[in-house]
Amino acid sequence: MQKLIAVLLLFIPTLSFAQNDQTFTSENKIYLPNIKTVLCYNSNKEQSLPVIMLNSSETITFSFDDLLAGTKNYWYTIEHCTAEWKPSQISTIDYLGSFNDDRIINYRYSSNTTRKYTHYELSLPNTQIQPKIGGNYVLKVYLDGDKNKPVISQRFYVLDNQVAIAAEITNSLQVEYRNNKQKVNFTVNHAFPIPNPYQDLKAVVMQNFNANTIQVNSRPAFVRPNQLVYNDLNTNDFWGDNEFRKFDTRSLRYKADNVKDIYRDKESVNVMLFQDAPRSVGAFGNQFDENGNFFIRNTDGRDDKTEAEYMGVLFTLNAAAPSANGDAYVIGRFNNYTMSNENKLLYDASRKQFYGNIMLKQGLYDYEFAWFNKDTKTLETKPFEGAFFQTENSYQVFVYYRRPGARWDTLVGFTNLSNKVSDRR
């Protein structure tokens, strides 16, 4: 066992500082390996959805860490996008009532940490950057004022609230999936005329703020006076998945939830989690989770932002490969549910075991295991986590309207709902 631990710890995450030759996309993405722990949320509640009301006092809090430490010349701007997250192709004059870009000047150095880093933070809107229309926005961070040197792209939303959304979560109406899927039905109530709802209005439904789950509704099932109903039998069906797995590293002085061992020396901190087993068979087991979220916490110090340690976290999954051609990943909101070499697991066929080491900042984390089938090009959690109707999930419904003659999509409605246990009984 000691030999195995020694071998696994060789996979401590390291940073590669190759030249960045990427270009910006409209996805939540980090372009440099030294950038970690990107947070973006409505400032009223930590890790809430980054949705703010237009012309209100609400703000977005955005932050990240640079593991190269020191001070860098980071700049940022924002870009308006369509309902499908394509650039709106409109002038900045149309959506910005301020300057086009600005430098991030709010930063602090880490203290009392094994690995040194610099924490950057900003708030939107501010005196320099002020969106003046509703819709989808991408915050772009780049180096040295050069947009050809991308660092981070981050989605957020500005709501010009004009409609009311009534939504509910039910069993799938498809009999074969009633125990595995959840269906979202909703109604859009509007007080202004919508001449062509089949063309001018789009509704997007998403599960647990996971962009991989997005379903776009371009046609309501029923059109009534001042009301659009979306309850088609075959739309807005989502796999229920399972409650997220979790671990607790708020303190590195003792082993908390799901932590088996803690190894630390003068240069690094490594945490080994208990080995996980697949949950695709058997009965549903209810447990509290944060629907994929994560929270930076450090109870050993006084400041979560600058005194939390960076750790190599060792994940181990005891499971056979679901198919011959594919890869396993650890996903959650901490990595935007995306696939990268950093969160891809290695597979030991002789042991039927997946394992990997990911660098994360000290705190509370939800995670799950997913399998990317290279033949079907699909990323699914069902092979490892199962899918149950009883799972508590949150769903986000966004409604976009392009009025006749307009050149952009406006976010006119939003709601966030969940099927908590108390609501299901």
Image: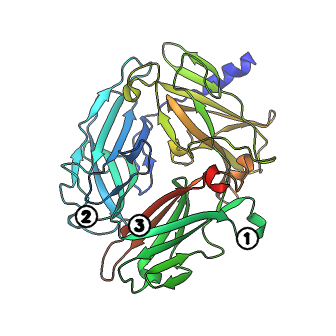
Please give left or right for residue 319 compared with residue 269 in the image. right
Is label 2 or label 1 in front? Answer: 1
Residue pointed to by mark 3? 413
Q: In the image shown, does 161 or 380 lie closer to the viewer?
A: 161
Q: Residue at x 70, y 56 (%)?
A: 389
Residue pointed to by mark 1? 174
Residues at discs 3 and 2 in contact (Cβ within 8 Å)? no
Mark 1 element type: loop
- Near mark 2 (Cα within 10 A), the count class, few <14, some 14-19 or many ≥20, is some
The image shows residue 255 at horizontal and vertical percentages of 61, 20
Amino acid marked by disc 1: Gln
Quadrant in which the C terminus appears: bottom right
Compare marks 3 and 1 and give the one earlier in the sequence: 1
Does residue 347 lie above or below 409 as drawn? above
Does residue 204 lie above or below 303 as drawn? below
Is label 3 or label 2 in front? Answer: 3
Does residue 350 lie above or below 371 as drawn? above
Compare marks 2 and 1 and give the one earlier in the sequence: 2
Amino acid marked by disc 3: Gly
Amino acid marked by disc 2: Tyr
Residue 23 in view, yes or no: no
State the CA–CA distance, disc 3 to disc 2: 18 Å
Badge count = 3
Does residue 68 lie above or below 264 as drawn? below
Residue pointed to by mark 2? 95
Residue 46 in view, yes or no: yes
The image shows residue 252 at horizontal and vertical percentages of 53, 19
- Near mark 1 (Cα within 10 A), the count class, few <14, some 14-19 or many ≥20, is few
Mark 2 element type: helix
Q: Residue at x 65, y 45 (%)?
A: 243
